[in-house]
Amino acid sequence: MPEAAPDFRSFPPPWNYLVPIGRKLLIWGIFFLVLYLLRHFLPLIFLTFVFAYIAEHGVQGLAHRIRSRKARTAIVFLLMISVIGLVVTYLGPELKNQAADFLKTAPDYLHEVDRIVEEQRKTQPWVGEILGDRKAKDLLGDLLGIHGQTSVEAAPPPGEPLPSLLPEQSGTETLRKLFSIFKNAVGLTTAFLLALLFAFLIVRDLPRISRGVVALKGTKLRFLYDEVANSVFRFGLVLGRFLEAQLVIALVNTALTTIGMTALGIRPLAFLAGVVFLCSFIPVAGVFISTVPICLVALKISGFSLVLWVILMVTLVHMVEAYVLNPMIMGHHLKLNPVLVLAVLIVGHELFGLWGLLLGVPTVTYFFTHAIQEDPPPPKILAPPR
């Protein structure tokens, strides 16, 4: 039997509250130090969590039809792999081609924006006062946070590629960059496949893994278990619910926006729909980011009037999201004030980049709903064994 934890309340003041605080800080300091040391594996850990969370829902849904957990896990992962394979096989090449075409014609869009802005400067003096001599490249650079890499020179004529922001490179440097791109692609693919494998193994043996984790309560590591286990589990639950809700919202947003773009005659559909889908995982700010390329394409196709139709279409789609999808899908436990969400996204992106955008909102949600409130009873999965 492990030794009972010391009762810090019996310590004389001020140690009766300083010692527990120091103990908590030490435990969580060790926890975050481990996360920092594993920072290069965070994409793999995150993907594994996402796949495992989605698959566990499927496995639980088949429990009333198939008794064997291993069989249910195999069925769910075969279905997931089939869906991913179909998307990569049929949509992957089209997305790649449309993305390449969009980047190739990007100077045309920038040139069109510069032309319209120049016309407005002549008729509306306040436009010049606000924008000054800034060009489309400068505004786009500010929007994407690429400072010091854009200039105020005129956009290149339509059809010509954007000027290179890099100096002339030797053959060796070019080969080195190509090898780096190849290595990154291989690393991403490997992480994706490993995440699927790890998620399969975790979901298949989840009851046994849960019993092993709970068994730590009967060891000398009980102090770590009592401090960390419940909080990590609840944060994982909040993060999983957030990603699950955002996935449904992203699919509905993408479908409605694609229908709207089809009605307005905007192409390329696959690439723009892909941008909308990815940006849907960024609350509030995602709608503005995903609307920019659609508006650029609309401006090139039919001028400012089509841009207004695009803005109207996107507004209607996100009214459906705000007043129908969010209350129904997000639920009360994940709703935050939009101003707070924007602040979290700005601070999260500034401090942690992409991870701040992905994890900032669920992290703040967790702290508001769990960490700063009195702890409810622990979930069943973390209850001590009898």
Image (cartoon, helix red, strand yellow):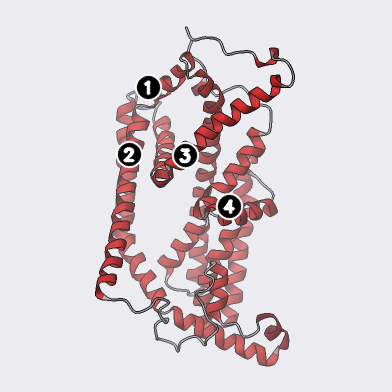
Location of residue 89 with respect to 223 vertically, above or below: below
Neighbours of disc 3 within 10 Å: few (<14), some (14-19), many (20+): few
Disc nearer the start of the sequence (4/3): 3
Neighbours of disc 2 within 10 Å: few (<14), some (14-19), many (20+): many
Disc nearer the start of the sequence (4/2): 2
Marks 1/3: CA distance? 24 Å
Q: Secondary structure at mark 4?
A: helix
Name the amino acid type tagged 1. Answer: Arg
Location of residue 308 with respect to 368 vertically, above or below: below
Name the amino acid type tagged 4. Answer: Gly
Q: Which residue shows up at 34% across the image and 53% down it? A: 188
Which residue appears farthest toward the right when viewing the image?
Answer: 13
Residue under label 4, please give it. Answer: 348
Which numbered circle lies on residue 343?
A: none
Lateral position of residue 61 relative to residue 80, left or right: right
Residue under label 1, please give it. Answer: 208
Q: Which residue shows up at 68% across the image and 86% down it? A: 128
Disc nearer the start of the sequence (1/3): 3
Q: Which residue shows up at 51% across the image and 33% down it? A: 30
Residue under label 2, please give it. Answer: 77
Q: Secondary structure at mark 2?
A: helix
Location of residue 178 with respect to 207 vertically, above or below: below
Instruction: State the image coordinates of residue 295 (x, y, percent, origin top left).
Output: 54, 74
Location of residue 121 with respect to 311 vertically, above or below: below
Q: Which residue shows up at 59% across the image and 25% down it? A: 23
Neighbours of disc 1 within 10 Å: few (<14), some (14-19), many (20+): few
Disc nearer the start of the sequence (3/2): 3
